Amino acid sequence: MRATTADVTLAGHAVPWWALVGALGLISTAIAYSTGVGAARALGSKVASFVGLTEVLFAILIAWALLGQLPRPVQLVGGVLILIGVIAVKADERSQVADLAVEPEPPDPTLDGDRSAV
């Protein structure tokens, strides 16, 4: 293994090594991290944790499509279980939101309206 600071050829153009390292850091780290944080906020922590598990599913699918590595039955079952988990968590989240949508009870008319003395 060795490292060099020579220019790199990218798409037929000579590019300084530090430009590619910076782009790699910006694209693969900063943008991916910030979009992940935004997605976690939009989805909620419970759903985001299960959606994060789909990274394994996509890795298997990409390995299958690009490298011809056929997933084993146990891997397919695991992927299906992850998808079922995501769906179940999302359904539970929706039912909790529906429970919160109950209208509040009207105030009791027998109570004194002036609560400043309390």
Image (cartoon, rainbow, N blue to C red):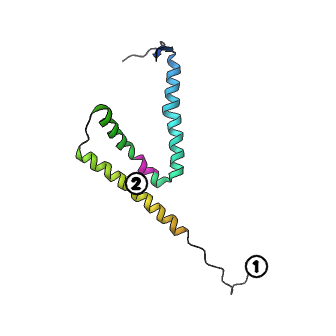
Numbered tag placed on residue 117 in the rendering: 1
Q: Does the magenta portion include 92?
A: no
Answer whether labels 1 and 2 touch (C-beta < 8 Å): no
Q: Give the range drawn in magenta.
A: 48-52
In the image, 106: left or right of 45? right
Q: Residues within 10 Å of mark 1 (few under 14, many from 20)?
A: few
- In the picture as drawn, the residue positioned furthest to the bottom comes out as 110
Please provide percent x and percent y for residue 55. Answer: 39, 42
Please provide percent x and percent y for residue 14. Answer: 50, 13
Determine the main secondary structure of the stretch shown in magenta.
helix
Q: How crowded is mark 2: few (under 14 residues within 10 Å), some or many (20 or more)?
A: many
- Tell me the residue that label 2 is attached to: 86
Can you tell which of label 1 and label 2 is closer to the viewer?
Answer: 2
Q: Quadrant of the N terminus?
A: top left
Q: First in sequence, mark 1 or 2: give its number.
A: 2
Determine the residue positioned at 31% across, 51% down. Answer: 80
Q: Relative to residue 90, is residue 7 depicted above or below?
A: above
Q: Quadrant of the C terminus?
A: bottom right
